Image (cartoon, rainbow, N blue to C red):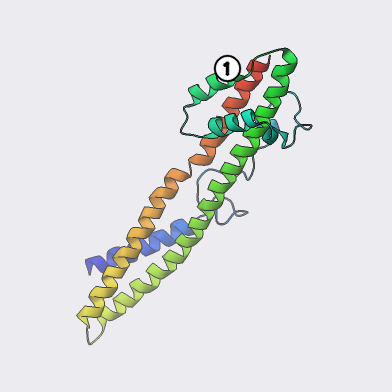
């Protein structure tokens, strides 16, 4: 009886959590933070316009390599900022050219990373909704098997083990999602900090 009530409680709690979308425009968005689909250039960049840059940063092997390094979150931000300062040398014109290319590369790369993470979170949220329905249905089925006139202990045990596994997977996903929900904000902050560093070193 105890395990049955616990499983039912998990199913109901999970159902309520999965249904609680922070913004009705994005029903699959699982995080308490508001979903902002894209970072805007104006939100992070006060330097010279980069309209003339486009994707030309990819044509410069040195800049492409540096962009990949700076965008990697395993690189401490302090080290990334130092790398920016070391790279942006030369005349004012050279600094401006390199700074615009570097920012354009970081903006494109970090925005793509961010979108990938957010899409992944929404895919997992859809799996969680499916899992909720499975847990809820199996919990009801287990209750019926346990309260029937004839009990098949083998089948009851099998379904109980299956429910335990399903709820464990659900909880594991929930914990991972809670952690990953912080990643888009971390990417925003990294892009803002690096953009500010580039602007300072261009001056």
Residue 32 at x, y percent in the picture: 50, 45
Residue 141 at x, y percent in the picture: 34, 77
In the visual, does 76 lie left or right of 28? left
Note whether residue 46 is visible.
Answer: no
Residue 82 at x, y percent in the picture: 53, 19
SS assignment at label 1: helix
Is residue 37 shown above or below 199?
Answer: below
Is residue 41 shown above or below 132?
Answer: above
155 or 51, which lies in front? 51
Which image quadrant for residue 93?
top right
Q: Which residue is mark 1?
A: 86
Quadrant the C terminus occupies: top right
* Residue for point 46% across, 45% down: 180
Q: Residue furthest front?
A: 61
* Residue for point 31% across, 64% down: 165
In the visual, does 25 lie left or right of 134? right
53 or 153, which lies in front? 53
Note whether residue 162 is visible.
Answer: yes
Q: Residues within 10 Å of mark 1 (few under 14, many from 20)?
A: few
* Residue for point 64% across, 17% down: 200
In the visual, does 145 lie left or right of 64? left
Residue 112 at x, y percent in the picture: 61, 43
99 or 19, which lies in front? 99
Q: Residue furthest right?
A: 52
Quadrant the N terminus occupies: bottom left
In the visual, does 59 lie left or right of 26? right
């Amino acid at each position: 009886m105890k395990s049955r009530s616990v499983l039912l409680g998990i199913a109901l709690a999970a159902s309520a959590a999965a249904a609680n979308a922070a913004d009705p425009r994005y029903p699959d968005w699982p995080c308490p933070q508001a979903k902002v689909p894209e970072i805007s250039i104006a939100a992070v960049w006060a330097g010279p316009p980069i309209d003339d840059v486009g994707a030309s940063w990819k044509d410069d092997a040195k800049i492409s390599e540096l962009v990949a390094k700076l965008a990697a979150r395993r690189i401490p931000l302090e080290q990334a900022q130092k790398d920016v300062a070391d790279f942006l040398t030369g005349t004012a014109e050279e600094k401006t050219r390199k700074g615009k290319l570097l920012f354009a590369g970081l903006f494109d790369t970090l925005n793509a990373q961010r979108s990938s993470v957010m899409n992944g979170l929404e895919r997992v949220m859809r799996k969680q909704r499916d899992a909720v329905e499975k847990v809820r249905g199996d919990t009801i089925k287990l209750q019926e098997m346990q309260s029937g006139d004839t009990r098949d202990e083998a089948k009851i045990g099998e379904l109980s083990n299956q429910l335990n596994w399903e709820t464990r997977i659900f909880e594991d996903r929930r914990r991972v999602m809670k952690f990953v929900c912080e990643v888009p904000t971390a990417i925003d902050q990294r892009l803002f900090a690096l953009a500010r560093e580039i602007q300072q070193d261009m001056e």
